[in-house]
Amino acid sequence: MSNIQKLLRVLLALELLVIVYFSLKSPQGGVNVQLNDKVGHFIGYGILSLNTFLVFGFRSKWHTTFILLFLIGWGVLMEWLQGFVPGREVSGWDIVANAIGVAIGTSFYYVRRRFLV
């Protein structure tokens, strides 16, 4: 395994931890910024998806489907767990933003793999 692969694996673990932290922390100050929230979900899960595929690649249709379902399921789980955090609530739109981020991140990886490498 190359040093870049090792670094990508460490970054992937850190990304998961950062998503858990921001998903489950109590809100500060009560400021409600919906647009930035959705953009954050979109970017966070897009980067998570891209890096996941940089680490694991497209090995087979089953493998790719598993990763996609895992990432979307992770977003659903984090959103569901928010329902237990004081001051937080579950939002279907956050789940949609997560899933779109996963789709875009996966698309970036596919385009990179198909046309650039």
Image (cartoon, rainbow, N blue to C red):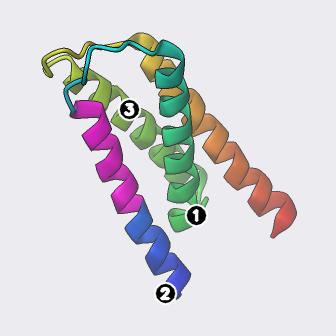
Q: Are marks 2 and 3 in contact (CB under 8 Å)?
A: no
- Where is residue 51, by image quadrant? bottom right
Where residue 79 sits: x, y (%)? Answer: 31, 24
Question: Which residue range is magenta in the image?
Answer: 12-24
Q: Is residue 81 left or right of residue 113?
A: left
Percent x, y of residue 115: 86, 60
Q: Nearer the viewer, residue 75 or 63?
A: 75
What amino acid type should be assigned to the residue bearing mark 2? Met
Name the residue: 47% across, 14% down.
Answer: 34
* Residue 62 in view, yes or no: no
- Residue 117 picture location, percent across and down: 81, 70
3 is within the stretch colored magenta = no
**Amino acid tagged 3:** Gly
> Magenta part mainly helix, strand or loop?
helix
At label 1, the amino acid type is: Leu
Mark 3, residue position: 75
Q: Residue under circle 2? A: 1
Mark 2 and mark 3: Cα distance apart in space: 29 Å
